[in-house]
Amino acid sequence: MKYIAASIAISALAATAVEAQEERRKIAPPAVYDVAPGLGHFTDDVLFGEVWERTELPSRDRSLVTLSAIVSTGKTAQIGAHVSRALDNGVKPGEIGELITHLAFYSGWPNAISAVTETKKVFDERQIAPVKNSEAARIELEAAAEAARSETVSTTVAPTAAALADLTNRVLFGDLWQRPDLSARDRSLVTIAALIAVGQPEQLPFHANRAMDSGLTPSEASEVLAHVAFYAGWPRAMSAVPVLKQVLNNRQGTQVSASQADLKITPAGIGSASAPEEYFTGTVQISGRYQADAPARIGGATVSFSAGARTAWHTHPLGQTLFIVSGRGLVQKEGEAVQEVGSGDVVWIPPLIRHWHGASSTGPMTHFAVAEALDGSSVTWMEKVSDEDYGKGVRE
């Protein structure tokens, strides 16, 4: 009887342990298990049972990344739970407040104000005193990098949006990025997580490089992608992969040995497609598009313009070369007269020069364009060339 009783007791304890384990694994809201049991499984077993347990990114950083994703995308209902988790993971109240402040600039004031309201509830529940500004020394940004960034803003943004350029240089980088309430590394981590979450991968190169210059490792940067995928969706994480890949390759200075390298031939007409309407006026076809592998950063394409078609205003961080294949075309640097070009002419546009190019009004033009990428970006598009401005060029 003693053995039977002992067996029953052991079985009862085992059953209780299993039930307790099952209970511990249930992290999703109760309604999830009634409505979407599959979601409950992925929440408990994959997101929290696997991803949050991965050591490639510390739990404190995962909380920063998660808060950045949900604050920047306005997921207000989820903020309270993750603020609590962040505090448990070692994120300080002042750092949470500064994260919200930082993201006001990158995802808008409404998201930030909504996040403050939900965060205040958690702070009140935990009897956390009001947060004060840090009295530590301000963060000193790298002088050469800041000079180059400021010059780019002054050259490419100021001519169109002087106030935005001023606020970018004076407030965003001249004040916010120097606040000691969040370390330089964490501020960059917060920024790249938010950019991925809101679907702005084209802004990643600058901030990913800055993050790694401040101490974020390549493996940690890669892990951010996997983590954000659960909070902003797979499409946005996948869209950021090639951008981060280029950044990492550039930083590694990846070299390919002669035995591994292959010649690449792009047959004529391959990949021919209409140029995106937001960047071109008129009928424009792009074909033979190519991009060299790192460490090379050159790329280009053959672009064919119908009569009157042209690009929008734009700049190139490292300049652009145009070889006029056929027809007659027009090229204009902002502030100067339109110049006419023809078959066989070669045009060099220096870095950061605002310009446009296209066909004449009387016939088509085709050119082969070549440009180098800087931090994964080879062009910055601006507003379209108006019919009036194009017409002035034709008359001149």
Image (cartoon, rainbow, N blue to C red):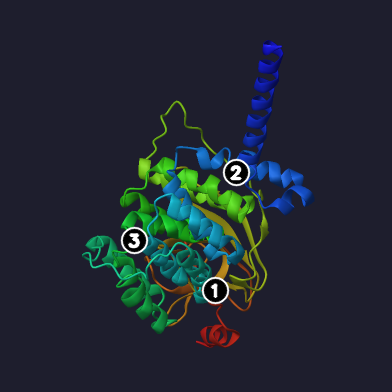
Q: Residue furthest left?
A: 137
Is label 2 or label 1 in front? Answer: 2
The answer for how far apart the CA atoms under marks 3 and 1 are is 39 Å
Residue drawn 37% across and 71% down? 130
Q: Nearer the viewer, residue 137 or 328?
A: 137
Q: Position of residue 194 (x, y in %)?
A: 50, 60
Q: Which residue is mark 3?
A: 182
Q: Quadrant of residue 375?
A: bottom left
Q: Which residue is mark 1?
A: 312
Q: Position of residue 326 (x, y in %)?
A: 58, 63
Residue 166 seen in the figure: yes
Q: Which of the two labelled residues, at mark 2 and mark 1, occupies the earlier sequence position? A: 2
Judged left or right of residue 159, residue 226 is: right
Say which element carries label 1.
loop
Q: Quadrant of residue 257?
A: top left
The answer for how far apart the CA atoms under marks 2 and 1 are is 44 Å
Q: Which of the two labelled residues, at mark 3 and mark 2, occupies the earlier sequence position? A: 2
Say which element carries label 3.
loop
Q: Report crowding for label 1: few under 14, some 14 to 19, many 20 or more residues within 10 A (C-alpha).
A: many
Q: Nearer the viewer, residue 368 or 35?
A: 35
Residue drawn 31% across and 77% down? 170
1 to 274, vertically: above or below: above
Q: Report crowding for label 2: few under 14, some 14 to 19, many 20 or more residues within 10 A (C-alpha).
A: some
Q: Position of residue 356 (x, y in %)?
A: 50, 73
Q: Which residue is mark 2?
A: 47
Is label 3 or label 1 in front? Answer: 3
Q: Give amino acid for label 2.
A: Leu
Quadrant showing the N terminus = top right
